[in-house]
Image (cartoon, rainbow, N blue to C red):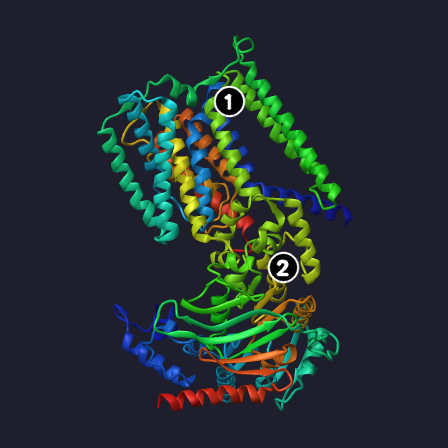
């Protein structure tokens, strides 16, 4: 509800005798926004700009305090590639002006691009510091420090036994924005996933992938949803997450802290939450069965904790993600939809999550993987759908897909849109 | 060197026991304090018996209020006024008509249920903030109660009704004398059953092969609790025996303790309060949970209205004033989180008893009511402060 300018000078207001000098606030804010490459006027409401731009506002805010040292913690985790590039270039330009920046990130290519020196931390201690004067360090060199060994395969091998049977199919799925019904967020998307198949969804931020997944998962997003959904060949209408879970769907959210886990509760309670009927009879919880189930999934997911009674909020990001995935595997879904399953977690945990996905498809289940990291999609998926602006713009098999082709498909669709509107 | 580490270890165990049972320790300290201040008068059989009867309303309301607080720190400001409405409906029905008291009880609870559904509908399905809905309810039902009473005080003289709520259980034969032995026998039976149940549970757990708390701590817990039960029943035996109202309280407490601890339905309240969005995506009907919380609290307020009517013997336009605040206070003293998602019925009951002891201790001591308010406020603040300090260190960021 606040404007960009108000946010930037929060707690650091430009004052005049009896209040705040708004003209000065917005004048300075505009200047700083230009510095970070934003063209929006400072009077824009913060909620009306995308997360990528919000991140830039955050940096502009830091600049308003005349900083000498800028520390960024995972600044790009919610940004698309374009915004990321812009942010990183901004850091390089700050460097020329003599400002020091520390960037904390899981994205190795970004570090390689921007950092002069890279320090690897693992289990709370410093492993090594690598100089990177030419900005061309090999990613596997960093990974070696992170996992303590050379990691030859970033993606586990698996047998491809894709069945002919289709696990889930969606036909001309259309979803409108929950607040602005005239805005189409997902526009007539059709796709299918076979049993034993991992299907990927790639798209830039705002392409409508999360919205597509959530609207399929019991209409958890949007309004005026239309289209047909088939699970195991049977047409379904799923009106609530409960119905979706009962139909064999699971949706692992991209925002584990926001709408995935109950951080104040323990591993045990989080694990069983989506499928309480497995550990209860007539609505009465069998406490012992619940503990055993939680321990089983703790072991299966290899969650590092001192007991299943540990509060989830105290776990590391990777372990939280494993709890979240364990929770949904506990529900024994036929179709598992993963939304950014490896965001903000370390390389070792990523690998384990990939293995869990492979296990799912080896058991003849279907997996849908939404990701903004192209290499992992290319490494994991059998087929990849490319989305842009709510539309499906390409369907590529694993063999034909490359980073260049995917980006080209997106750019083509943007160009087409442009020519149609102009 | 070795000695100091051993000492350090015992110190940390003592500390962890203290931290886990902060409220119980506060309860004991408050009890001892007022016992000394009143020169033992707090321990008189009559005072001990009244301790429960005078606070029955807080205990019952706190059970319902806890459900609301669990859903996300939401409170129900209207309970005091719902108590008043239900009390006055029952009183008027019995005073002006000849309807059987049992029917009156059901009719009153029916009205409470309708009020609960109304609040639950607005809060759960229309998503109007609970604070506003129940604030409106507070004015609305206070006014309606006064209209029903026609601004008078109505007495209740229906024997059947009074028997159901405010009489004492006596068995002819053993309770004829000065000491009502039935109360003492009941107390001993309850503690025996409790001891046996705890041991069976423990054996079952260790047989399944997962960790049980140390034998020492279990024994301490069992012996403290059974000692309290036996002691309290001894006191009741020396007054008038087991009050029926105590049975109502125990029934409500047991039902809600079981509900919150052992059922999927109860677990859902914690999930919704812990993270509403996550709960929703996990298939929980969050609207229904909000709805149920307010239905339950209103139903209990209805029961409370009947109990208060029976205990006081009359109802007027001010009956139930500030009951909502007492029950909210009990929940928070008992360790419920003001943001929802955590808190137990046991804690809320301990909270209710702490407030009750403070109230009664201060009255017996002869402190005037103005000071009683000051001290009650200070105790709520202190209790919650210590709770956050020791138990929620990792969550308070």
Callouts 1 and 2 on one subunit = no
Residue shown at the point (53%, 68%) measured from the top left: A254
Quadrant of the rendered image containing residue B207 = top right
Query: In front: B231, or B8?
Result: B231
Quadrant of the rendered image containing residue A226 = bottom left
For marks 1 and 2, give the CA distance.
Answer: 58 Å
Residue shown at the point (74%, 79%) measured from the top left: A150
Q: How far from the left and from the top, in percent, is residue B10?
A: 69, 43
- At numbered mark 1, what does the secondary structure look like: helix, strand or loop? helix
Q: Which residue is mark 2?
A: A332
Q: Is residue A132 left or right of residue A94?
A: right
Question: Callout 2: residue from which chain?
Answer: A
Q: How far from the left and from the top, in percent, is residue B27?
A: 52, 35
Classify mark 2: residues with Cα within 10 Å, few (<14), some (14-19) or many (20+): some
Q: How far from the left and from the top, in percent, is residue A354?
A: 66, 71
User: Taking B163 as reference, is A375 above or below it?
Assistant: below
Residue shown at the point (52%, 35%) measured from the top left: B255
Q: Which label was assigned to residue A237?
A: none
Residue B51 shows in this picture: no
- At numbered mark 2, what does the secondary structure look like: helix, strand or loop? loop
Classify mark 1: residues with Cα within 10 Å, few (<14), some (14-19) or many (20+): some
Q: Is residue A354 left or right of residue A30?
A: right
Q: Which residue is mark 1?
A: B43
Q: How far from the left and from the top, in percent, is residue B246?
A: 48, 26
Label 1–label 2 contact, CB within 8 A:
no
Question: Callout 1: residue from which chain?
Answer: B
């Amino acid at each position: 509800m606040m404007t960009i300018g108000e946010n930037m000078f929060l707690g650091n207001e430009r004052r005049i005798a009896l209040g705040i000098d708004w003209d000065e606030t917005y004048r300075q804010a505009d200047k700083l926004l230009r510095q970070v490459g934003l063209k929006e006027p400072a009077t824009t409401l913060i909620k009306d700009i995308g997360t990528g731009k919000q991140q830039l506002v955050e940096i502009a805010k830091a600049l308003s305090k005349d900083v000498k040292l800028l520390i960024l913690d995972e600044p790009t985790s919610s940004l698309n590639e374009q915004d990321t590039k812009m942010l990183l270039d901004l850091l390089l330009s700050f460097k020329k002006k003599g400002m020091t920046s520390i960037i904390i990130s899981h994205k190795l290519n970004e570090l390689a691009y921007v950092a002069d020196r890279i320090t690897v931390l693992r289990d709370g201690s410093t492993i090594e510091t690598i100089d990177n004067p030419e900005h061309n360090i090999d990613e596997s060199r960093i990974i070696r420090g992170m996992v303590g060994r050379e990691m030859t395969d970033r993606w586990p091998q698996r047998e491809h036994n894709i069945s002919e049977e289709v696990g889930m199919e969606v036909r001309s799925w259309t979803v409108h924005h929950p607040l602005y019904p005239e805005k189409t967020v997902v526009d007539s998307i059709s796709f299918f996933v076979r049993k034993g198949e991992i299907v990927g969804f790639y798209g830039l931020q705002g392409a409508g992938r999360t919205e597509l997944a959530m609207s399929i998962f019991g209409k958890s997003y949007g309004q005026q949803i239309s289209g047909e959904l088939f699970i195991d060949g049977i047409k379904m209408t799923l009106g609530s997450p409960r119905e979706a879970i009962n139909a064999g769907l699971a949706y692992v959210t991209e925002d584990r802290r926001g709408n995935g886990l109950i951080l104040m509760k323990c591993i045990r309670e989080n694990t069983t939450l989506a499928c309480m009927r497995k550990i209860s009879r007539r609505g009465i919880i069998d406490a012992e069965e619940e503990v055993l189930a939680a321990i089983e999934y703790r072991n299966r997911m290899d969650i590092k904790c001192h007991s299943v009674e540990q509060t989830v909020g105290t776990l590391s990001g990777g372990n939280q993600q494993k709890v979240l995935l364990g929770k949904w595997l506990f529900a024994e879904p036929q179709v598992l939809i993963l939304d950014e399953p490896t965001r903000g977690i370390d390389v070792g945990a990523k690998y384990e999550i990939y293995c869990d996905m492979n296990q799912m498809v080896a058991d003849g289940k279907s997996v849908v993987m939404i990701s903004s990291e192209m290499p992992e999609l290319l490494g994991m998926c059998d087929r990849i759908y490319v989305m842009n602006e709510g539309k499906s713009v390409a369907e590529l098999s694993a063999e034909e897909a490359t980073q260049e082709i995917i980006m080209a498909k997106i750019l083509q669709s943007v160009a087409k849109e442009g020519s149609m509107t102009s | 060197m070795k000695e100091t580490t051993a000492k350090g270890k015992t110190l940390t165990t003592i500390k962890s026991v203290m931290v886990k049972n902060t409220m119980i320790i506060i309860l004991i300290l408050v009890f001892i304090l007022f016992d000394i201040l009143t020169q033992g008068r707090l321990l008189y059989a009559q005072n001990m018996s009244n301790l429960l009867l005078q606070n029955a309303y807080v205990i019952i309301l706190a059970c319902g209020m806890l459900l609301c607080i669990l859903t996300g720190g939401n409170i129900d400001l209207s309970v005091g006024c719902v108590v008043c409405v239900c009390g006055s409906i029952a009183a008027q029905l019995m005073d002006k008509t000849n309807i059987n008291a049992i029917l009156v009880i059901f009719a009153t609870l029916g009205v409470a249920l309708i009020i609960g559904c109304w609040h639950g509908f607005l809060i759960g399905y229309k998503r109007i903030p609970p604070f506003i809905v129940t604030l409106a309810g507070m004015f609305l039902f206070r006014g309606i109660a006064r209209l029903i009473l026609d601004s008078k005080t109505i007495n209740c003289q229906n024997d059947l009704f009074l028997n159901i709520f405010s009489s004492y259980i006596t068995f002819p034969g053993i309770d004829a004398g000065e000491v009502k032995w039935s109360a003492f026998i009941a107390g001993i039976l309850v503690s025996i059953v409790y001891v046996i149940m705890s041991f069976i549970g423990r054996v079952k757990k260790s047989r399944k092969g997962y960790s049980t708390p140390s034998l020492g701590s279990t024994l301490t817990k069992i012996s403290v609790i059974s000692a309290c039960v036996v002691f309290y029943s001894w006191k009741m035996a020396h007054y008038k025996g087991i009050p029926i109202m105590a049975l109502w309280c125990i029934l409500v407490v047991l039902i809600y303790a079981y509900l919150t601890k052992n059922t999927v339905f109860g677990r859902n309240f914690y999930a919704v309060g812990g993270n509403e969005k996550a709960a929703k995506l996990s298939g929980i009907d969050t609207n229904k949970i909000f709805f149920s919380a307010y239905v339950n609290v209103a139903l209990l307020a209805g029961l409370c209205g009947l109990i208060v009517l029976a205990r006081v013997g009359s109802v007027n336009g001010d009956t139930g004033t500030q009951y909502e605040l007492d029950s909210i206070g009990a929940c928070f003293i008992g360790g419920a989180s003001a943001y929802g998602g955590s808190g137990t019925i046991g804690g809320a009951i301990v909270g209710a008893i702490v407030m009750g002891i403070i109230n009664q201790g201060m009255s017996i001591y002869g402190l005037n009511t103005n000071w009683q308010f000051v001290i009650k406020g200070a105790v709520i603040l202190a209790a919650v402060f210590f709770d956050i300090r020791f138990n929620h260190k990792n969550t308070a960021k």
